[in-house]
């Protein structure tokens, strides 16, 4: 016996996210040392409006023209990132963020490029058979 049914199909989806943080350290940076490090924490999900945001800490060491070394860091919260068709039952939201940096005048500008992964659901009509 078979029955036609409307079922929600779950799949993994992604949304892009870009956040820019600018820091003006006390000592003027001349060059950057290595690559920036970014720590993502505090994911906040608003399922009713199909969006999420995250908090971050990003930091990097730098050299000054006088030969001193400093550390620039920024903390903040991203803008709301849309996560369309997110599952209300099992959203499984996560953020993978990569930081890049550049000297801009007397400041260091961090660009956080992220990929937000989550579970989305789409209704579909399926034939269900019983044995």
Image: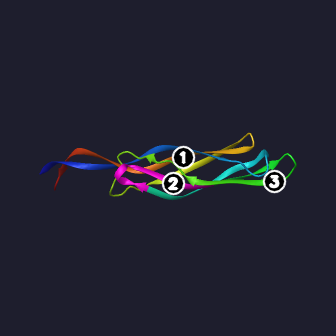
Question: Which residue sits furthest top?
Answer: 105
Classify residue 96 as left or right of residue 126: right
Locate residue 23 relative to residue 41 in the image: left or right: right
Identify which residue is drawn at 33% across, 55% down. 88
- Magenta stretch containing residue 56, yes or no? yes
**131 above or below 98?**
below
- Decide if residue 89 is in sight here: yes
Tell me where residue 122 sits by quadrant. Answer: top left
- Residue shown at the point (30%, 49%) measured from the top left: 9
Q: Distance between the residues labelled 1 and 3?
A: 29 Å
Q: Label 1: which residue?
A: 114
Crowdedness of circle 1 by 10 Å Cα count: few (<14), some, many (20+)?
A: some
Label 2 environment density (alpha carbons within 10 Å; few <14, some 14–19, many ≥20): some
Report x, y in % for residue 17.
51, 44
**Badges 2 and 1: C-beta atoms under 8 Å apart?**
yes
For disc 3, the marked residue is: 69
| Spot occupied by residue 97 in the image (x, y as percentages of width and height) | 56, 49
Circle 1/circle 3 CB separation < 8 Å = no
Query: Where's residue 81, x and y in %?
Result: 46, 46
Query: Horizontally, is 80 left or right of 9 in the view?
Result: right
Residue at 38%, 55% in the rendered image? 91
The secondary structure that most of the magenta stretch takes on is strand
Q: What stretch is highlighted in magenta?
A: 45-57
Q: Earlier in the sequence, mark 1 or mark 3?
A: 3
Q: Which of 118 and 11 is in front in this view?
A: 118
At horizontal 85% and vertical 45% (from top left) the residue drawn is: 65
Of residues 90 and 110, the one nearer the viewer is 110
């Amino acid at each position: 016996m078979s029955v036609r049914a409307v079922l929600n199909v779950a799949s993994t989806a992604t949304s892009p996210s870009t956040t820019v943080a600018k820091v003006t350290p006390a000592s003027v940076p001349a060059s950057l040392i290595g690559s920036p490090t970014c720590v993502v924490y505090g994911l906040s999900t608003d399922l009713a409006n199909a969006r999420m945001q995250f908090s971050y800490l990003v930091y990097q060491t730098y050299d000054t023209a006088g030969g001193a070394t400093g550390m620039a860091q920024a903390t903040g919260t991203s803008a709301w990132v849309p996560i369309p068709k997110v599952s209300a039952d099992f959203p499984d939201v996560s953020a993978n963020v990569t930081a890049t940096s550049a000297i801009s005048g007397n400041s260091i500008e961090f660009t956080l490029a992220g990929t937000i992964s989550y579970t989305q659901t789409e209704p579909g009509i399926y034939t269900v058979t019983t044995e």
